[in-house]
Image: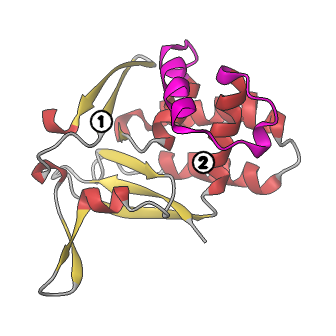
Amino acid sequence: MSYASIYGIRSDFTAVEVKQYHDSWFFLSQIDIVLGGKYLNIKDTHKMMLSLRDQRKLECKVSKAKITEDYILRLLEHQQIFFTKDKEFIADCIQRFFMENVRYYHPDNTDLIEFYNGLRRDILDLDETKYPYFIFNASSVSDTIHNLFFRYDDDTFEYIPVSLKEKDEEIVNFVCIENGIIKKLISNLEI
């Protein structure tokens, strides 16, 4: 079974998994269901699996929309890096998204309610001094996040931590938020 997790990112741009959540579908599919229905007018969103074309269309529409919490959740889902100093704002966005959207679709799903409340609490509990940044790994099915921060050592047969600074290609963005507004996305090459 897949899981989701939060990785705390240290000031040297290495990371550690700080929290793991069972059943990544609680996050991933709910975001696509809500945003796909809202921005692409897809009916029967509970059966929805977005094509790559629809994903791109959705990305464009959400990023241009004036609803910040939709964009924040989309960025969380797509595994972008956030500054931990913005954790209260991000937790508030999760709450607003949940209250306005997910709760409407699943008012009696206590597992989903507990998941979103736990995610908010865990983000708020992140220690800014220990982890100035964090990233949400939406699903363990993909090894994208693991590969950002770990490399397999053929000599020791173990994964060893690597700094994001060692990457020489653009692979992830840092989300810059000022006064409750997403100002810009900064490439890992610009840090």
Q: Which residue is nearer to you in this view: 123 or 146?
A: 146
| Disc 2 and disc 1 in contact, CB within 8 angstroms | no
**Are there few (<14), some (14-19), or many (20+) residues within 10 Å of tag 1?**
some
Location of residue 49 by image quarter: top right
Q: Is residue 191 visible?
A: no
Above or below residue 85? Residue 142 is below
- The span picked out in magenta is 39-68
Q: Residue furthest bottom?
A: 156
In reply to whether residue 124 is colored magenta, the answer given is: no
For the C terminus, which image quadrant? top left
The reply to whether the magenta stretch includes residue 52 is yes
Residue at 74% of width from left, 51% of height from top?
112
Amino acid at dot 1: Asn
Residue drawn at the location 35% of the way across and 54% of the way down: 8
102 to 160, vertically: above or below: above
Q: Residue at x 67, y 53 (%)?
A: 26
Q: Where residue 82 appears, x then y in whole percent?
A: 36, 38
Q: Between 102 and 8, which is closer to the camera in this rendering?
A: 102
Q: Position of residue 189 (x, y in %)?
A: 15, 37
Residue 127, percent across and down? 37, 51
Q: Amino acid at mark 2?
A: Leu
Q: Which residue is mark 1?
A: 173
Residue labelled with disc 2: 28
| Mark 2 and mark 1: Cα distance apart in space | 19 Å
Q: Is residue 5 left or right of residue 155?
A: right
Please give the name of the residue rendered at 11% of the width and 86% of the height, measured from the top-left corner. Answer: 155
